[in-house]
């Protein structure tokens, strides 16, 4: 029971995901495995994930075995597992708008090789699920790769905020081809969005009127460096803001998004959530939370579930938007819902009690 997976963008998130498949390769089907939300998902375990293809543009990654490329600079996430040679060479994709003004020069584009035929590579490798980890703002590149994914007949897991799964026109095209699509923009296992969203829901449920809220985020990796370019951030802000906004049934002044690049943080991310409101008798209340995490293992903790959900959908002949898995795992899903509802529906999907 293997799940053949291809990766677009061998950055920090890819590193954490690949490491995770080794870290959890021997886990038993216990009810609680630290760090995993599901050890056994409808018969699929983490060890069933097999990487068969990977694409990047950086000369320090292209031409390397995936097991080496994930640890190549400028990747700077935590190493938590050794990864043996995987026999999967990272191949060159087209650069297009993948690199913004801050990443150009930092990411060293491989000039020696021509981009490969992505559709052919995906088909030849037998990839079933393609995970997209391109940098924020790669509007053209993501759409171009999504076309290749459809040509190759694979499921698409869109981990970043160019809207594909949540765009009805794109989702319809995947559905017409009999292919599942999940996204958009991963909501980390214990990240800023799920925390902020859950706090907002708590305050509203407890009758607190939220008067204003912000969420500031800083980090020191290429993701945060790239996100200094405000123009590339439009969909990221929409994605992050929509997740919190959906929990508050009235208009509130809010500001949410990546806030600065602090190089020495490496792949660590610091998030500050501030919420101000009033409760009984108009009495003021303020909530301030600081979250300190490694960013990429946080995304992998969820993507490992979406990969398996996509394969389950394939097995069951379900195509198009994977509504419940997307609501569970992404910031900007086709249907936004409180976390507990999304989690319950996702479990129902896994058990086969809900189609999507
Ligand atoms: N917790 C998280 O880390 C998290 C959560 C939500 C969303 N995301 C999103 O996931 C994406 C990946 O994050 P990351 O930390 O791995 O970023 P990263 O910068 O470490 O990796 C991006 C990779 O894409 C490669 N690339 C650039 N242009 C390319 C092209 N045209 N074709 C192929 N490869 C190309 C880069 O060389 C790099 O290796 C980002 O968009 C990020 O915002 C991450």
Image (spheres, helix red, strand yellow):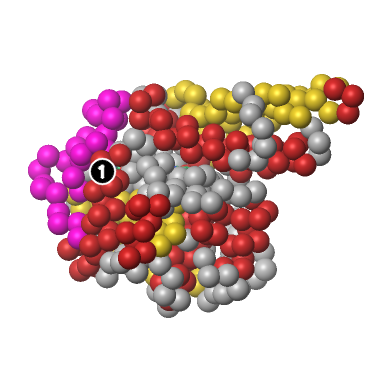
Query: Total of numbered circles in the picture?
Result: 1
Q: Which residues are magenta?
A: 93-119
In the displayed structure image, the side of residue 345 where residue 185 appears, left or right: left
Q: Residue at x 89, y 24 (%)?
A: 281
* Residue 94 inside the magenta-drawn segment: yes
Relative image position of residue 244 (x, y in whole percent): 60, 37
* Residue 32 inside the magenta-drawn segment: no
Q: Residue at x 34, y 35 (%)?
A: 137
Q: Quadrant of residue 57?
A: top left
The residue wearing badge 1 is 141
Foreground residue among 46 and 233:
233
Relative image position of residue 214 (x, y in whole percent): 61, 26
Relative image position of residue 300 (x, y in whole percent): 48, 52
Q: Is mark 1 within 8 Å of ligand 1?
A: yes
In the displayed structure image, the side of residue 304 where residue 209 appears, left or right: right
Q: Is residue 243 visible?
A: yes
Helix, strand or loop at label 1? It is helix
In the displayed structure image, the side of residue 116 where residue 24 appears, left or right: right
Q: Residue at x 53, y 70 (%)?
A: 355
In the displayed structure image, the side of residue 353 where residue 225 appears, left or right: left
Q: Quadrant of residue 197?
A: top right
Foreground residue among 26 and 222:
222
Q: Is residue 268 visible?
A: no
Q: Residue at x 30, y 38 (%)?
A: 138
Magenta: main secondary structure equals: loop
Quarter holding ligand 1? top left
Foreground residue among 192 and 174:
174
């Amino acid at each position: 029971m293997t799940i053949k997976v291809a990766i677009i963008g061998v950055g920090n998130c890819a590193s954490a995901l690949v490491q995770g498949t080794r870290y959890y390769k021997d886990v038993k089907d216990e009810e609680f495995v630290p760090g995993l939300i599901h050890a056994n998902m409808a018969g699929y375990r983490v060890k069933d994930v097999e990487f068969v293809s990977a694409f990047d543009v950086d000369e320090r990654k292209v031409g390397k075995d995936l097991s080496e490329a994930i640890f190549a600079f400028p990747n700077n996430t935590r190493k938590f597992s050794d990864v043996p040679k995987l026999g999967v060479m990272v191949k060159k994709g087209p650069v297009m708008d993948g690199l913004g003004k801050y990443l150009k020069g930092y990411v060293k584009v491989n000039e020696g090789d021509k981009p490969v035929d992505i559709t052919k590579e995906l088909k030849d490798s037998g990839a079933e699920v393609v995970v997209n980890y391109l940098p924020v703002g790669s509007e053209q590149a993501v759409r171009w790769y999504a076309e290749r994914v459809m040509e190759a007949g694979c499921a698409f897991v869109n981990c970043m905020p160019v809207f594909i799964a949540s765009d009805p026109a794109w989702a319809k095209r995947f559905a017409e081809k009999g292919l599942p699509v999940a996204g958009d923009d991963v909501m980390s296992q214990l990240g800023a969005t799920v925390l902020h969203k859950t706090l907002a829901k708590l305050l509203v449920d407890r009758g607190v009127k939220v008067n204003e809220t912000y969420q500031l985020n800083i980090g020191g990796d290429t993701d945060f460096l790239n996100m200094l370019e405000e123009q590339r951030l439009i969909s990221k802000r929409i994605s992050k803001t929509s997740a919190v906004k959906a929990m508050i049934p009235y208009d509130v002044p809010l500001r949410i998004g990546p806030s600065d690049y602090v190089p020495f943080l490496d792949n660590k991310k610091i998030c500050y959530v501030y919420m101000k409101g009033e409760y009984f008798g108009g009495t003021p209340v303020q909530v301030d939370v600081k979250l300190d995490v490694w960013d990429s293992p946080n995304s992998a903790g969820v993507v490992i579930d979406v990969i398996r959900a996509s394969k389950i959908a394939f097995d069951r002949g379900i195509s198009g938007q994977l509504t419940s898995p997307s609501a569970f795992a992404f910031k900007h899903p086709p249907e936004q819902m409180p976390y507990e509802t999304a989690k319950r529906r996702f479990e129902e999907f896994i058990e086969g009690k809900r189609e999507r």
